[in-house]
Amino acid sequence: MLMGGDELEPLSGNCGFDALDWEMLANGGVRSLPIDLGLQDGLQIASDAYVSPVSSSQACTCDEDVSNIVRNLGRAEMSHDIIHMLRTGVSLTDRLLTCPICYDVSKPPRVTVQNVLLVGQLMLEITSGYQKYLHWLNKHCAELDARNESETVYLDPGIGIPSELSLQISGEKFRDLVMHGLETDAERLLALGKEFEQRQRNRHRVGHETCPDPEGRCRRKEHDPLDLCPQNPAARKLVPCFRIVDEVQGMIKEVADAVVNESHV
């Protein structure tokens, strides 16, 4: 396999991705992946080369939990309550990144890619949810001011019981207050994106620590179809893990930029 040359050896096997899927991955991203998060069946991957990641005695609930979050977000009416659901999804992402079952690094990449797909799909839903909430928040607060109405904010006494102490503030000031609070959410998303990237980088460096050789070739003699040498420039486009990482970081950046820009209006 040439490292940065003009030719690239074809991958053996397809790991559930046909020629069109690979082309979409090269030009698109996680939105183009052959993923179907069904409400009943969880994650499904087109899989004529599929290998079950775990036995029934070792199965985790990550795919079911992702399906539940996606379903709940899809059914939820837009309100401030959706922030709690989005934060629950972020916590689930954190768990996915360290799950020792569906991301068992002793298994080949064609198996653990299912976990990567779950992270990608979940982050797509979460970042989309934040964007929709920001749009709704701006509209909601503008309408409050247009009607000369206020928003009620309850102060937490910090003793574990509901507070009766409240403040009435304008829509504009309420929006500023919420946006300030969402800066913490944005920081957490950015940290998860970096952790995801580092995890995948470490994963694909295994067995390729000394690549390339003096001739610019991968030193590894045998390859899992999804274990394209990370030193190869084509890996960023052909390996789903790298494509999903790039997509996730791009979606997170959009949310973080929106929060920062709105906070400093």
Image (cartoon, rainbow, N blue to C red):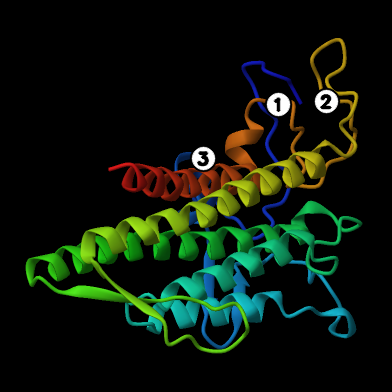
- Which of the marked residues, 1 or 3, is nearer the chain's N terminus? 3
Q: At 64% across and 81% down in the image, what residue appears?
A: 64
Q: Where is 4 relative to 255, above or below?
A: above
Tell me if 107 is positioned left or right of 21 in this view.
Answer: right
Quadrant, the C terminus: top left
Front residue (pair 97, 46): 97
Q: Residue at x 81, y 45 (%)?
A: 203
Q: Pointer 3 and pointer 2: residues touching (CB < 8 Å)?
A: no
* Location of residue 130 in the rendering, given as x and y in whole percent from the top left corner: 41, 61
Q: Which residue shows up at 83% across the image and 20% down it?
A: 212
Q: CA distance from mark 3 to mark 2?
A: 21 Å
Give the mark nearest the N terminus, 1 or 2.
2
Amino acid carrying mark 3 in the image: Ala
Distance Cα–Cα, label 1 vs label 3: 14 Å
At 59% from the left and 84% from the top, the residue drawn is: 41
Question: What amino acid is at disc 2?
Answer: Cys
| Lower sequence index among marks 3 and 2 | 3
Height in image: 84 above or below 163?
Answer: above
Where residue 196 sits: x, y (%)? 68, 49
Crowd tier of the residue under label 3, counting other residues whose Cα lies within 10 Å: few below 14, some 14–19, many 20 or above:
some
Can residue 177 be seen at all in this image of the molecule? yes
* Circles 1, 2 touching at the beta carbon (< 8 Å): yes
Front residue (pair 254, 24): 254
Indicate the secondary structure of the residue bearing disc 1: loop
Answer whether residue 49 is visible to the viewer in this image: no
Mark linked to residue 26: 3
Badge 2: how crowded within 10 Å, few (<14), some, or many (20+)?
many
**Which numbered marker is on residue 232?**
1
SS at mark 2? loop
The quarter of the picture where the N terminus appears is top right
